[in-house]
Amino acid sequence: MKKRQNVTIKGTKEGLVLHLDDSCSYDELKKELDYKLSANSSTQDERHLTSVKVEIGNRYLTEPQREELKELIRQKKNFVVDEIESNVITKDEAEELLAETEVMTVSRIIRSGQVLEVPGDLLLIGDVNPGGTVIAGGNIFIMGTLKGIAHAGCYGNDEAIIAASSMKPSQLRISDCLNSAPDSLQSNEKREMECAYIDENRQIIVDRLQVLIQLRPNLTRLEGGH
Amino acid sequence: MGEAIVITSGKGGVGKTTTSANIGTSLALQGKKVCLVDTDIGLRNLDVVMGLENRIIYDLVDVVEKRCKIHQALVKDKRFDGLLYLLPAAQTVDKSAVKPEQMKELIIELKQDYDYIIIDCPAGIEQGFQNAVAGADKAIVVTTPEASAVRDADRIIGLLEKQPNMESPKLVINRIRNHMVKNGDMLEIDEVTQHLSIELIGIVADDDEVIKASNHGEPIALNPNNKASIAYRNIARRILGESIPLQSLENADKGMFTKIKKFFGVR
């Protein structure tokens, strides 16, 4: 009986794809990969590097294992591993991913000295008082008055925006851009329904909420509809 | 079983001690059995405002360290027929002499015998604050209509809201100078309450008489006609939930406000 192949090499339009079976053991896989790549070494001899994609199906590889596989492939051939694609992620990773894309709704007042941090978008029902800080990995929407500090896209997302029913921040931060409130700002000036975003000169601009429809069409999550 | 109310502000000099003394006095005037507790260890002055300084024998730290019984340390206010007592703070040590758990125990013990325990909190948010709030069921935040005081009050409210078993704090706006509010040089009442978003339980106008009274060791609340005195007594009545219903607070405040306006007009 012929043994089922654990490692198959396919050529596609995008380049070589190494498909690694997900039902055998990791050691077995490594052994076969090692053997396959060594066996083929004579056929290709040119010096230039070929990038390959590795598909591992429903197998979960830890970070050291991924490194080990990359190392193995790199040694044997003029291959460079472009990416390792797996169908599975851990629960932690899934939760992290979910949190980053989730809109977290919080109903409270962020008072002086308090810091509220969420990994994804933040919908705050309440005020941010002076001395208070809200930080989000994504966008920040405040249904109330922003009088403190808001930091959107804190992991480096330039597309993030800050919107507030009443925009009187002491400081705005988006990604790594920073914008202090102008000292000349009249305190009685109405700053209602406004948003802040980074423009092409990497400056934080505060404008009417409606400009976002043009500038950040990705804010719309609804697909389809009329 | 009594109720422990901590009077706090964050910022110093806004009138915590004066407010504590006057709310305590007003509650005693209403016939409640009140114990004032000064937790400003090392910087005690509630006894001075109450005029009870000379009669201190033991203090809070003595009680906590079991050098005396609680009743030995309590100073009775002779103006009230056994209704008002003061537990003075120690003066020779500092705030680290007491731990929050010890304060909690102390307050629980006092609650057996008194209707109201009014705890005068020191300024700041450190150990002294932690001690003062440890045993409290309710909190009253005192602020003045100044940006700095309001900012600190905001911080304190944030900390109070994190305390377990603590009701949402109530607000007293103290030392309002009506002419400055009118000129826009001082924050307005509405502005302060909106900013802090907690229930307003009283407003007190700035009055030289208040300072005069504390210098004489007689809380202003003992003066039957003074406007600030009435304001403090109204706060006490609101705490009791009796004469001035809280639901008409807005109107009551407006009423009080016009009263104060009139008062200034008269002057």
Image (cartoon, helix red, strand yellow):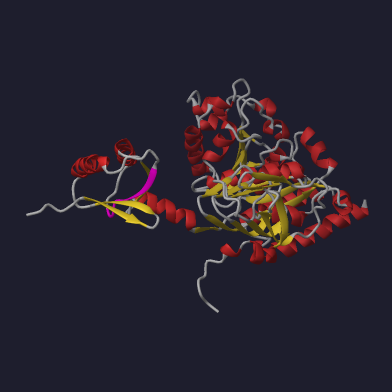
Residue B166 magenta: no
Describe residue A176's horizontal placement relative to residue B179 as left or right.
Answer: left
Which residue shows up at 50% across the image and 50% down it?
Answer: A119
The image position of residue A215, as x and y in percent, is: 65, 62
Q: Is residue B236 visible?
A: yes
Report the residue that reaches farthest toward the bottom: A226
The image position of residue B3, as x and y in percent, is: 54, 47
Residue closer to the observer: B264 or A149: A149
Describe residue B264's horizontal placement relative to residue B103 as left or right.
Answer: right
Describe residue B141's horizontal placement relative to residue A91 as left or right.
Answer: right
The image position of residue A11, as x and y in percent, is: 32, 55
Which residue shows up at 70% across the image and 59% down it?
Answer: A166
Report the residue that reaches farthest toward the top: B92
Residue closer to the observer: B170 or A50: A50
Q: Is residue B234 visible?
A: no
Residue closer to the observer: A137 or B92: A137
Describe residue B203's horizontal placement relative to residue B120 as left or right.
Answer: right
| Position of A204 relative to B44 (above/below) | below
Which residue shows up at 66% across the image and 39% down it?
Answer: B10
Predominant SS along the magenta part: strand
Residue A55 magenta: yes
Q: Magenta segment, which residues?
A: A50-58
| Figure quadrant of residue B156 | top right
